[in-house]
Image (cartoon, rainbow, N blue to C red):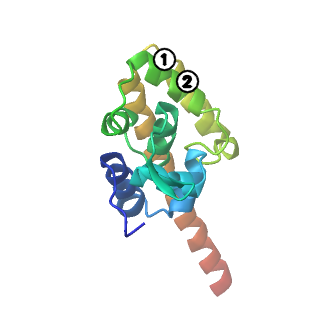
Amino acid sequence: MADRALTPLGELLEEARKTVLHLSAREAARRAGVSESRWRQVVTGVQTKAGATVPVRPTARTVVAMALAVQVDPAIALDKAGLAVSDTGLAAMLASNRATPGSYPSAPGDRPELQAEIQRIQDLRLPAATRLAMLRALITLHAEVEEEQERRDEGRGFEQAAG
């Protein structure tokens, strides 16, 4: 992908993927529920068909899924992609995305308490942007708690091995 320029959407997604989350393209694609090749096509804005390079026009649903996979505001991603979606349309995509296998956050079924909290936020009668900010804060908090738990578990393992 180094030889291809990125679209404005691609720059936004790749910046978050690489520098903020430190994810591989494969992992980001998995979280978004798309193939790695589709991820690369969307961020570069082109694909090869029958030997010809043609523009890629992702759907709003794909853009939202990819944005959520790398913790980017879907409304900003849609704007960068040149797609106009109402708050109602965005809310519908956010609601359907949480039920998509492989969608962000990864493996919510493994964390039923997080899934329940996500569901409660999605059910609130608030603008999509407000719910999105709440979801982002919730997911960040859960990630921090998991990291702290992992550090504690590693410390206990070290203590047990040393003792």
Outermost residue to the top: 125
Screen quadrant of the N terminus = bottom left
Q: Is residue 44 visible?
A: yes
Spot occupied by residue 50 in the image (x, y as percentages of width and height): 57, 55
Screen quadrant of the C terminus = bottom right
Instruction: Reply above or below: 104 against 160.
Output: above
Spot occupied by residue 141 in the image (x, y as percentages of width and height): 45, 45
Instruction: Reply above or below: 39 against 92.
Output: below
* Residue pointed to by mark 2: 120
Determine the secondary structure under disc 1. Answer: loop
Spot occupied by residue 122 in the image (x, y as percentages of width and height): 52, 23
- Classify mark 1: residues with Cα within 10 Å, few (<14), some (14-19) or many (20+): few
Left or right of 71, for residue 108:
right
Instruction: Reply above or below: 127 against 144.
Output: above
Amino acid on which the number 1 mark rests in the picture:
Leu
* Residue pointed to by mark 1: 124
Image quarter for residue 155?
bottom right
Determine the secondary structure under disc 2. Answer: helix
The residue drawn where x is 35% and y is 46% is: 9
The residue drawn where x is 37% and y is 63% is: 4
Left or right of 22, for residue 76:
left
Q: Find the distance from the CA under tag 1 to the CA under tag 2.
A: 7 Å
Amino acid on which the number 2 mark rests in the picture:
Arg
Left or right of 141, for residue 162:
right
